Every structure is written in C-alpha cells, then in structure tokens.
Amino acid sequence: MRMEVAQAAPTVTHVRLIGRLDIAGAQAIDLHFNVLVGSSPSLIVDLSEVDFIASMGLRTLMLGARVMASKRRRMVLCGAGRQVSEVLVVSGIGQIVAMAEHLDAALQIVSA
C-alpha cells in the first residue's frame, strides 16, 4: 500500500491510497494516516486506486472518520471502484463519513 499526499485546497488534504488496503496495507499507512487525521482541517481520501479492502482497512478509515468528526472536521471518501464501494456500503461506513464518486464532488462536500 502506498499513500500519496497533496494539498487539494488551502485547508483540504488529498490522500491517494494505492494498492490493497488489507492487514499489511493498513499497517503500512496507519501512522502517517493518523497524523493527517489529527492535523488536517479537511481530508479527502481517494480510493480510486485501491483494488481490495479488508476489515483492517475499514477500521483505519472508520477510526479516522470518527476522530475527524469529534473535532468537527470533514473527511470524505471518494473514487471507490465497484468492489471496494460494495464493501464500504455493506460495512455502513457511509453513516460515519461522506462518500463521493470523484474528487470534484468530494471537494464540494468539504467546502460546503
């Protein structure tokens, strides 16, 4: 799992995840992801290049979303492919964090 970080706007951090968000993938990004969750006013997590997500990956995303919400900050997941999107929907993560089809839609959500 690779994680690329860029500023999408002055107060919006864009995190692009690449690879498998399984146990090993979650372990590879957890520390840096948690730092971003703790320091970013708004966070967009781009899942367009994630081809598999397991429970540990869901846990990473859910914990991050809960921390952001507790600080009244916004986190949006975007770009999930069909298989990853199905896992996200079945998990109920949409009740915790907003989801968008693409980056532009995610930017609109965090800017609202």
Image: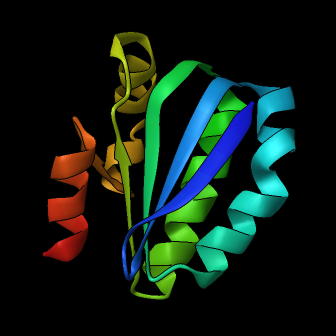
Quadrant, the N terminus? top right
Q: Is residue 23 above or below residue 58?
A: above
Q: Position of residue 44 (x, y in %)?
A: 41, 57
Task: Identify the residue at image location x=85%, y=41%.
Answer: 28
The image shows residue 90 at horizontal and vertical percentages of 39, 26
Q: Is residue 57 left or right of residue 102?
A: right
Query: Residue 53's quadrant in the figure?
Result: top right
Residue toward you, 61 or 19: 19
Q: Is residue 63 left or right of residue 34?
A: left
Query: Quick check: 40 above or below 4?
Result: below
- Taking depth in this image into account, of 53 and 15 the one nearest to the observer is 15
Q: Residue at x 73, y 72 (%)?
A: 35
Question: Is residue 110 toward the left or the right of residue 54 in the image?
Answer: left
| Total marks placed | 0
Residue 18 position (above or below residue 40): above
Coloring scheme used: rainbow
Image point (59%, 56%), residue name: 5
The C terminus is located in which quarter? Answer: bottom left
x and y percent of residue 111 in the render?
19, 74
Tell me what residue is drawn at x 18 percent, y 49 percent.
104
